[in-house]
Every structure is written in structure tokens, then in C-alpha cells.
Amino acid sequence: MGSTTPPVAEATAVTKRFGSTVALRDAHLTVLAGETHALVGRNGAGKSTLVSILTGLQAPDEGTVTFGGEPAPRVADRDAWRRRVACVYQKSTIIPELTVAENLFLNRHAHARGGLISWRTVRRQARELLETWSVDVDVSTPAAELSVEQRQFVEIARALSFGARFIVLDEPTAQLDGAAINRLFDRIRELQQQGVTFLFISHHLQEIYDLCDTVTVFRDARHILTSRVDDLPRTELVAAMTGDADRGAAPGGRPRPARTDGTAEVLSVAGLSATGGYQDVSFAVSAGEIVGLAGAASSGRTELAETVVGLRAADAGEVRIGGRRPRPGSVPAALAAGVGFVPQDRHHQGYVPEMSIADNGTLTVPERLGPRGLIDGRRRDALAHTMIDNLAIKTPGPGQHVSGLSGGNQQKVVMARALANDPGLLVLINPTAGVDVRSKEFLLGKVEETADRGTAVLVASDELDDLRLCDRVLVFFQGRIVGEMQRGWHDHALVAAMEGMDLRV
Amino acid sequence: MSETTETTTTTTVPSAPAGARPVRRIAVARLRDLALIPAIVVIAIVGQLVNPVFLQTDNLVNVLQTMSEMAVLVLAETLVLIVKKMDLSLESTVGLAPGIAAWLTVPAGAGHGLGLLPGAWAVPVTLAVGLVVGAVNALFIIRFGLNGFIVTLGMLIVLRGLLTGISSGQTFFNLPGSMLYLGTTEWLGVPASVWICLLLFAAGIVVLGFTSFGRSLYAIGGNIDAAKAAGIRTDRVLWTVMVTAGLLAALSGLMLSGRLASVASAQGNGDIFTVFAAAVIGGISLNGGKGSMFGAFTGILLLFLIQNVLTLGGVPAQWIGALNGAIILVALVISRITGGKAQD
Amino acid sequence: MSETTETTTTTTVPSAPAGARPVRRIAVARLRDLALIPAIVVIAIVGQLVNPVFLQTDNLVNVLQTMSEMAVLVLAETLVLIVKKMDLSLESTVGLAPGIAAWLTVPAGAGHGLGLLPGAWAVPVTLAVGLVVGAVNALFIIRFGLNGFIVTLGMLIVLRGLLTGISSGQTFFNLPGSMLYLGTTEWLGVPASVWICLLLFAAGIVVLGFTSFGRSLYAIGGNIDAAKAAGIRTDRVLWTVMVTAGLLAALSGLMLSGRLASVASAQGNGDIFTVFAAAVIGGISLNGGKGSMFGAFTGILLLFLIQNVLTLGGVPAQWIGALNGAIILVALVISRITGGKAQD
Amino acid sequence: ASTTSAGGGAGAQVVGVDYPRSDTDFWNSYIQYTPQYAKQLGLSLKTTNSQNDVAKLAANVQTFVAEDVKGVAMAPQDTAAIAPTLAQLNAKKIPVVTVDTRPDTGDVYMVVRADNRAYGQKACEFLGTKLGGKGSVVMLEGDLASINGRDRTEAFNACMKQNFPSVTVYGEATNWDAATAAQKLQTDLTAHPDVKGVYMQSSFALAGTLQVLQQKGLLAGPKDPKHVFVVSNDGIPEELKDIAAGKIDATVSQPADLYAKYALYYLQSAIAGKVFKPGPTDHGSQIVQVRPGLLEDQLSAPLVTADGGTYGGITSLTSTDSSLWGNHLG
Ligand SMILES: Nc1ncnc2c1ncn2[C@@H]1O[C@H](COP(=O)(O)OP(=O)(O)OP(=O)(O)O)[C@@H](O)[C@H]1O
Ligand SMILES: Nc1ncnc2c1ncn2[C@@H]1O[C@H](COP(=O)(O)OP(=O)(O)OP(=O)(O)O)[C@@H](O)[C@H]1O
Ligand SMILES: [Mg+2]
Ligand SMILES: [Mg+2]
């Protein structure tokens, strides 16, 4: 750290409070020119808060930010900030009502003679920009119609198009599948070569080792350490994040008894088809078994899982749960048949932001809260306390609104709800998106525990960590099951299968 | 928002020390409900200084009686707003529902009616009209997916027009006894309409706060997709809410007709404005999912207390309006200061 | 509301067939703007059948003239709604702004004025009042973070009350010539107010569609955090919008006073209802970030055409209301069918 | 309610007066006259404003009762809905005088009003005569829900049908709103070029009507063949000035001053226990019994014209007549 040039960005003694929450306490961060600097920490450690301070969205309560040794611009002077730093925020900054083209060039539209916006030029520029990212969307589409992945690329493409020499990426990969991540990394490496500096936040530690030079760990609103990535083995990194050194085993390592034979079939899917989703899918899951549905973003695995839980209806085929045939397309029917599930996008379908943890967690089990639709507040809070304890949700109490939790903790609330009705079948779609390592272990450990108690589990995900604990994995490609892998598969074989390449099982 | 306490020193994730915390949390939640109480207290003190009549039981009962019909409307609108819909047509139902009942039951001649039905039918007809209006709104909004503001605005104009049409703009009077009952009877020395209003609000507080049906309203208003994914039959709940609102508006109209012993063709006109004002001032969000029944009640109470104090204070007629508005603004600022971000 | 939604339903098939899309997309965007055109055409045909006077230039100019003041209000409210705020107080500004000007300039005696200022001051005073009202609203809403609905509701009552107060409820007559100009002059044979209204809308279309300032309104209404992140000075834009709205309301009041050659103490009362109706029917969303100026214009045009046809048709007075509402509802259904989800 | 403790000092009788609204010229004149006459009569006054809302009126009356007034004057714009309130006051033995309107049911001590049907009748006779019994006229009505408006409409229509059958009447409901009135008048003038007369049921539409006529080039002198005859209603100062200036042709002067004066006069009489009988009064009007137990003092509402002539048997006053209240105000 003995560089002669001043650091590209430096935050010193930064403190930021939200009401009684201290999001950052006397934190510091130094990002040197040309490096790719990783910022890691558990959910709620204060990473995103630091990002918003570094990019001028929020002013710190105490402390200073400098760029290249110069004090940061005034908070009001957004243009000055944007010349110094570009950012992909964790929270989407896409405006759904506006077109893709306009989102890309918002507040910097091309103007024609006469000072009016030239939409033709804006669209052309947008098309060119997206072409370089091989994102094939019509730039006149309202952003609301984009898929999660497309939206994420629009954000990334926009951030990188400002020409800033310092770029912050707050969990850019959380919503991307393997191929898309590779595309992003290729591009980042290109820019690294050109000397662009990155601050990179991710809960996928492997990405840190693949991409970054330096890593800073935050824990509980404080700076814990900064080190060369090469000098910090994975176990030490995790220990620094979590504060305890003795754990670190990856999930799914435990041997599990095979459950495929003898036990009752909990879920059976027969000849299921839906146009635009999947075709002629059949499989079964037994009690105590964990089955993975793997595949790229548009392979149909998510749609299939959503059909099982009643969020969609299939065009043909049938779903049996615990021997019953719940009405297709009805979530209440699926719940009644004993399904618990974690939906794909927690913001969209997972929780009601302005309701408490207790209310969100017990939304699916009103019958457990009191007789005849009445709610006994004490029973509800007791139930919620159990959830908070079981899943280690970081909150002052069950009355906290979910909107005030960090992303990982929000995910835990959704998970808690899925487990609330003691499901016979647990369906998880991307269950650990945006969740930190230790919480991920926690959640996946809970899944195994649940399975051990006899629940059938279906995991639809493209995260290898999620899939590793499965007894077997069904690989989807373009809406069809193209293969099945038993426990003990190799990562590259699964990845290849998900990409539609030849299977070598 | 922002109510996490400092857990920075503990490294392991804490299992929320259950003792003191929840109490504080409940206190905060209560505070939001009680945001208007300081403003109401100030008004009460000012009222008492202005005119010692103010705090007399008679006067307070008067205020409650005068506001009872409007309060029932506020209750109805609160339900609708919590599920993130709007119902402007409530104000027309207040006139149309008892209007149709009067038209059908009042003997031809004296009171402009047709006299087609015996008087005992009046109350069921009134409520049925409210039910039908609510169902038509629900059909357009929930079934056909039209915008609630527009549909109920159209309905407001249609229904108001219908009443003008059937009454030729005249007032129905000589109403059957059954229609007068709620507006004229006293139970235990207090007007029936006051009891009904208070009981309905008590029921509203219980349903919204302590039943899973009530909670599903908040869930739908807060995030309808999440509510669906949580197995709430959202359409069914929305239908129930819209139809209940229509029914409550009809009841409100019945109470008002009873008190005034007539149905004017303009009955209810312009009320929706006050209704929205009361609900929003009382902390109900136009964006759905927020606010409590008790808050809504304090909202309408505040507005009527201000009116009462201005009347007792004998403000010159032409300055009543300005003063009324100024006091409302000040009350809002007070509740903003005492109740935090309650109004957002 | 934060964060973007709408993800689960779209299947990620990223390779959009690039050829046909842009055309279709522009067509859809246009369609949404034009959603009310079919309804307007139907009304025009019906109007012509009802009374051949309908399509005469004179009659159409009449319609444009009578709607011009209200249309300017709709324009103002559209700006405010797009940034996801509300301004109910516009209707009071319509009365108060010219009211204060008249009060200060009309000679004492004849028309209840004070006669403190020469007549030439009337127009600047009117506009200044609009500006001040807009600024006060902005101060409460943007600076102090109070809820826009509540603040402007309070302001509505205060301002209306102020006008009643200064006028003692009486009408100001004998306005200075400068105040009459806009309401009485013709330019190229068409009333000045029609020109002003059309020019303002043309300007509105250009500003909203083709300037960075205009686009920033949509960005703020769509997602204010994202707008901030994109470097838009959101507070400044919001101030500009609120103040402009006040100014436009004052202008609207000036035009109305000019046309009626007087300022009644009830001038503007109740207008805000029609204004919201026109804007929302015209496709402006109460949730911000959506809708176009052209759409808003078709909204108010539709409402006034319906009124005109009903008047020309000689519908019995007591059925005008019901018919008016029914036609509005039908028009909405037509535009729903032709324009897709235009109303949501 | 506000107290105007007038001359009488401590012993003054307290009466309550509810103003029906404060946003029209006519009622504002009433509001201005009331305290003046209370002072003259030595009454102590409590006032409220029901803003054209009968529910508010009911609440205001409750306040009066709480304040222990000895009599109440009111002007219920909804004549049916006031019945329960009247019954309540009756039960408390508080005498009531209604001004301007007559309750459909229920007893009051005295109704002080001018005959609204006569307004329509007078306007019709004047316009019919001036038009020579042919052509067409536009009637700018008030609100359909208003009893006074309805009386004027019905009387005007009936009189036209009977006395001037070849005059066509286009009636337009305006909700007492000037902008609506101007809009409808403009449409009618475009659609029916033969319109030669306008009857405004209230002065609210006065300035707007003149503007519309001016824009259409119809604001010509009374002798000009293009002249459109305009009859207004209320008798506010502006109308009288416009008649003198030849801009409008006639109005019916509603006695705002007498409304205030006799409302209070009858309240005082009621408190003193006086009893009235049908027949002529000492102030040139008639008390009539409209139904058993209901007396009505029908104050005269003179037709005002530029020449003070007689139209269809109805005499008129000139606009400068000093007996007109509009000539003593503002
Ligand atoms: N606007 C806000 N209001 C209240 N509390 C907030 C706000 N923003 C963040 N916090 C709180 O500050 C703390 C730090 O949050 P931050 O978003 O910075 O965490 P993070 O490290 O980015 O977590 P994750 O990995 O889950 O994204 C959390 O406890 C969070 O609840
Ligand atoms: N937000 C927007 N995004 C895209 N287009 C818009 C937007 N707003 C308006 N437009 C419209 O798009 C219309 C088409 O613009 P223009 O004529 O510049 O493009 P074009 O020739 O169709 O362009 P291209 O061939 O590049 O698609 C413009 O007239 C403008 O009204
Ligand atoms: Mg974060
Ligand atoms: Mg976070």
C-alpha cells in the first residue's frame, strides 16, 4: 500500500446511522489506482451503505471521502460525482416505465439541433451500447418488460458507459447465470487491462479469487481487514467475515443416506408441458429426498417449479402432491396439499415490505395463530421468535418491518415462511440469491435438516452451492430434461450440461 | 423505518433478547396510530376556552352524531384504500341507496314516491342497492381490470345522475318508519347512529388488527403478488372489500336519511372529498397497505371537532373557510412533529 | 415502493426478432396516447346525428373556448401527477389569484375592491399569487416532506376561505381591462384563450417528450432514487413543477375571469374533480411516471364534447347527469378495448 | 357562535341565525343586514353558517340549543330534510322563523319569503311582452335540487306556455355556477340563432352572460334588432347599474334587507308571545296561511326595469328607485 499516487478513492472514519441502526461505524476503505478491490462481509455488514456514500447518493454522518486525494464534490453536484465514479447499485436503478434506450441515456440524451432530444440518435446509441454486450433486446421496450438478467445487463452496460475510471459493482452477479457471469468477467478483465479500477462486492467468494487483487472485509459496520487476495486463504476470509474461525465447511459435504427407494413419492410430475416454458417433463421426488432442477436462466426450470407450487398452470400433464392433485394454478390448493416454497424474486413475490417479520413469516399459516381467523398476537410473536432463532435473522424483534432488513435477512424471512407450515414438499427457487456465505450455509443446512425429517425438497437453481446438497440433479435445457446426475457430480460436468453440451455422466 | 438497534459488538447473530424490545416497538406502532391525538387535545382545549359549551356531553354527543354517517363512509373507504383501490362512488351510494328505497316505498303523491313496495322493504332495498353498486364496481375493477379511480368516478356520476333522474331533483319525504329508525332512535340515551358508528369502528379495529382476513388486506395493499404467492385468495378478498364498502355506504345513507327524515337528490354530494381527507389525515396511505382503523377514526373526529369549535367560536361567516383550512394544516404539522413520518 | 418488479412472468428468451419490433412498439406507444380517439370519434358522430350544429366551426370553437381554462388546469395537474405528486389546491388558485388582483385593483365602491393598485398591475399580481401558492406547496411537500395530498387539501381549503374572506363572499365586477384581455380578445378570429390553451399543450408535448427536463419528470415519477442516481436534481425539478403548476392555475383563473368579466367567490370550486377525471381518463397515472400531454388533452376534450352533445341534444335536465356518467363509462370501455391497458 | 351583543345590554334576548351560505352576493347582503337589524331591534345575536348543507344546519341548530338561544332563524335550502330539526326545536319550545324557504313539513312560527313562483312569472311576463310573443329564450336555471330554483322554473315555463305559447324556452340546469351557465348559453346561442331573451334565475351568471353576448356581437342597444333581452334575478347593486346602463333589461329584486329585518322582527314577536293572523301587514305585504299552522309573510319582490313600465299587468320600479335595497349597499 505504499503507492506514491494518491488512492483513487478513500473513505476515512465514516459513520452512518439510520435511526438507531449503525450501518457504518468509523469505517475506512482505500482503493488504489488500477486494482480490483473486493469488499466482502455478511448481509447487513454495511457494504451497500458504503457504496452509496462513495458514490454520493448519501452523505456520511461523520468522516470524509476523497477521490485522487481531492475532497469529494458536494452531494448536490451529481455530475461531478459521476465523472469520478460509476456504479451498479444493489437496488435496481432502472425506471420500469421508461424504454431501455432512455434508461441507458437518462439525463444525458443526445440532442439534435434546436436543443430537442433526438430519439433516433438515443436509440442508435443504445443499440450500439447493448450490441457490445451482446444483449439482444429491442431498445424501445419499456424496461418493465425485461427479464431480471437483461435488466442487470442494462444496469451494468450503463454504469460502464460513462467512461469513469473507477467503477463500483454491488453484487452484479447475484441475478446472472453462469454464461452471463462469464461475459461480464471477460468485459471486466478487458477494462482492468485498460487500467480501470473496480470495487467489487459479491457473496460468491470464488469470484473474488478469480477477479480481484485486494480484499477488504467488513463486519458489523466496521472495517476488519484489508489484504492481498493471494495472501488470504478462503478459510481465513470466511473467518474474518463471520468472526469465528472454527467453521468453514462447504454445505453439502455431509454424506446423506440415499432415499430414492422404498419411501413414498411425495411429488410426481407427469407429462407436464407449458408453451414457452417446458415440454413433456416427468419426474418424482420421494420423502426425505432433495432433488435439484438445474439449467440456464431460460431453461424452464423456474417455470416448472412455479407450476408445482401453483403460481402457474400447465397446458398439459399433471402434478400430484402427497397423492392429491391440487387444482392447477392455485397457490392455496398447493399450500393445502402441503407445499412450502421460496419464490424466485423475493421483492416481487416474497414479502410485503411494510409488514412485520412476524406477519410476513406467518402469512401462510393463519390457522396456527388462533381460532376462526383470529390472530393471537402473542402466539404470532412466539412463532416469529422461533423463526428468528432458527434461521438466525438479524433483527431487533419480530415487529420489525421486512423493508428495514438487509437483503440476506429478507431472504431468510421468506425461507422461514416456506418452513412455517411444516411442508411435506419444499420448493426452493434460487433460495440463496444475495445471501452471504454463512447465512447460505445456515439456509442450506436448514434444508437438509428439513429433508432429514422426511420432507421432499425440490431446488430450482443455477447456483452450484445450492445444487451440491441434492441427492440428484435434473438438468434442464430449452424446456426439457436432458440429463440426471447423481450426488457426487463434478462442477464442470454439470455446468457443461446446463450449457447444453454433451453429457459425460 | 430504521429501528434496528445496535448489535455491532456481538459477533454471533443474536437471538433477539425478548424482554424490553417488543414493548418499545409496540409503543412506536401505537404512536403512529395516535398521531392525531395531540392535535385533537389541542383542539379540545381551544374549544373549551372559546366556549364552555364545548366539553358538555350534549355537545360532544352532537359532534359524534353529526359525524356518524360520514365516519361510516370513512370506514368503508379505509378498507378500500388499504387494499390499494379507490372508491369514489361511495358518496353517490349514500344518496342513491336510500333514494331508490324511498322512491319504491313512499306513497305516490305527497312524497314523490311510487309506492310500489310496503315500507318494511325500505331497509333491505337500501342495503341491496349498496351491495349491487359494490358488486358492479368490483366487476369492472377486479374482473375486467379497469382502473378503480376511473370506474368509480364514472359510477359516481352515473349513480348521482340516476338519483336526480328518479327524483326529478326533488326530495323524497314521508319516509317509512323503518328508514327513520336508525336516525332517530336513542339507545341508552345516546343516538343509535352514534352506537352503530362506534361499534362498526370497534369491529373494524378488531378485523384489521386481529384477524387473518384483516391482515390479508394489508398484504394485498402492500404487495399483491406476494399476497397471492402466500396463498391469499386475493380476488375473493378484493370482492369482499368492494361489496362491503358499497354496503357500508348504503348503511351510511340510511342513517343520514333517517336523521334528516328525507332523501334529498343531492344527498352525499361532495362527501367523498371529506372522506378522503379524513382517511389520509388519519394516516391511511393512498398507496395501499398502510394505516389503521383507529387512525381513520381520529381523522374524521378531528375534522368534525374543528368544525364544531369554529361554529361555537362564532367566526364571521366569510372567514370560517380560511380558518378551517389553516387549522387543518396546523393540525397536520402538529401530528407530523409528534407522530413521526405518519403521513407518508 | 422501491425496486423494479415484473420479472417472473417473462421467459428469458433474449433473442428478440429485431426486425418487426420497433414498428410495433412505437405503434403501441402511440396507441396508448391515442386511446381516447375512438371514443371522441364516436361522440362526434353521435353529436352530428343529434344536432347538425355540432360539427360547425362555431360550435367546436365554443367547446374549445369553454374548456380552455379547465384544460390549462389539466395541463398543470398532469405535470404534477407525472412526478408522482398531487396538487388539489389548483382549483382554489383559479379563484384566489384573480380574486386578489381584483381586490387590489378594482376601485372601491363599485365592485367591492380596495383600488390600491392601478389596473395594469392586475395581471402581474395574479401570476405572482399563483407563484407564491406553488412555492408554499413546494415548501411543505418537498422541503418539509409532508404528504402532498394532505398539504394541498389544506391549502385548497385555506385559499378558498381566503377568497371568501377578502371578497366577503361577493363577486368582483368592473375588472380592469388587462384582466379582461385574455378572455375577450380574438386572434385570427379565434378566441385568445383557445390559442393559449393549444399553444401551452403544444409546448407541453414538446417539453415532456423531447427535452431532458421533461424526461426527468418521468424519471422522478417512475423511481425517484434512480432519478437521483442518474444525476437529476430531483428537488429542483419538483420545485419547478409545483411552482409552474401554481402559475398555470393562476393563468387559468385569469382566463376564466376574463371570459366571465368577474371573479365570483366560488370561482374554481369543484373543478379539481373534473381535472383529475380528465387527466386520469387521458391516461395519466396517479402512481406517477406515466402518461402523455396529448393523452391528457384528449381526456378533457372528451369530457367537454360529451357535455356539449348533451346540451345540444336537449336531454331533460334531470337525466343529464346519469347520461353523462354512462357515456363516460362507455367511452372508457371503448378506449380500454382499443387502447389496451391504457388506463392502468 | 358569534355574539353581537347589541344595545340592549345584559337583558337582550339571544337569538340564533343560521346563514345558508356565504359565497353568493345575495346571501352576503343578508349576512350584512342581519347584525344591523339585530342592533336596531335590541337583540343579541348568535350566528352560524351551514354552507348550503342541511346536515350542517342540523348540527348548527344543536349548537344553538346548547347555547340556550330563545329563537332561531334559518334558511333551509333543503325544505324536506329540515323536518327533524324543526321537531326538535318545537319540543324544546324554541320558536323558528324560516327565511326564503318554506319547510315541506313541520311547524314554524313564521315563514319570511318572497314568492319564488312570482319571480318566474314576472320574468316571463316581461320577456314575453318584449319579444312580442315569439322567438325563443334561454333560461339559466339553478340547481335541480333547489326548491326556489324549481319554483322559478315551473312558474316561468307555465306562464310562457299559457301566455306566450309560440315562445320556445331552452332550459339549462347550471348548478348555480357561472362558468357552466356561460358554457350552456354559448352552446344555445350557436345552436339556436333565434334566441332573443335570457332569463337568469340568479345574478351569479350576470357578468358571464354579458360577456357571451358581447362575444357573439349581440350586446346591442335595446332599440337595435339584434338586442337580446336579459332578465336577471336578485337585485344586487351591479344589476341595477347594468339596467341603468342598458346592458340588461330587468331584474327581480329579492328583498335581502327585509329578509333580515323581518326574520328578526318575527323572532322578537315570538319571544314576546305575539300571535299573527292572515291578512295585510303594516309593511305592505300579505300574511297568508299556506297550510294549517303555517303562516307566511310574503314580502314583495318588485320587478325592476329601466322605464318602470307595466308588463302583462305587472308593475315595475325603475332601477334608481330608492326603495330598492340594492341602491343602499356597496
Ligand atoms: N435506508 C435505510 N434505513 C434503515 N436502515 C438501513 C437503510 N439502509 C441500510 N440500513 C441498515 O444498515 C445496515 C447495513 O445495510 P447494508 O445494505 O449496507 O448491508 P450490506 O452489507 O450491503 O448487506 P447485503 O449483503 O445484504 O446487501 C443493515 O442493518 C440495514 O438494515
Ligand atoms: N421515450 C421515448 N423513447 C423512444 N422514442 C420516443 C420516446 N418518446 C418519444 N419517442 C418518439 O419516437 C418517434 C420516432 O422518432 P424518430 O423519427 O427520431 O425515429 P425513427 O426514424 O423511427 O428512428 P429509428 O429508425 O432509429 O428507430 C419520435 O417522433 C418520438 O415521438
Ligand atoms: Mg448490499
Ligand atoms: Mg443490503
Image (spheres, coloured by chain):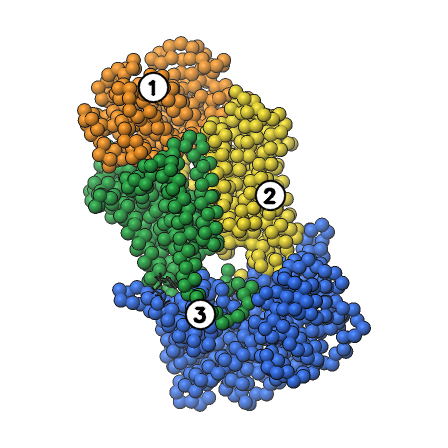
Chain colours: A blue, B yellow, C green, D orange
In which quadrant is the C terminus of chain A drawn? bottom right
Q: Chain of mark 3?
A: C
Q: Nearer the viewer, residue B328 or A229?
A: A229
- Rounded to the nearest angstrom, the CA distance separating label 3 from label 1 is 73 Å
Residue B41: x percent and y percent?
52, 45
* Residue named by callout 1: D165
Q: Horizontal and vertical percent for residue C31?
A: 42, 55
Horizontal arrangement in the rendering, residue B36 relative to residue D250 (left or right): right
Going 50% across and 71% down the picture, which residue do you hit? C14
Residue type at mark 2? Thr
Residue at horizontal 45%, vertical 49%? C335
Q: In the visual, does A112 lie left or right of B183?
A: left
Which disc number belongs to residue C18? 3
Q: Amino acid at mark 1?
A: Pro
Badge 2 is on which residue? B244
Label 3 is placed on what type of residue?
A: Ala
Numbered disc in front, either 2 or 1: 1
Disc 1, ligand 2: is the CB inside 8 Å?
no
Vertically, is B27 above or below A405? above
As drawn, is A17 to the left or to the right of C107?
A: right
Query: How far is the residue under mark 2 from the one under mark 1?
Result: 53 Å
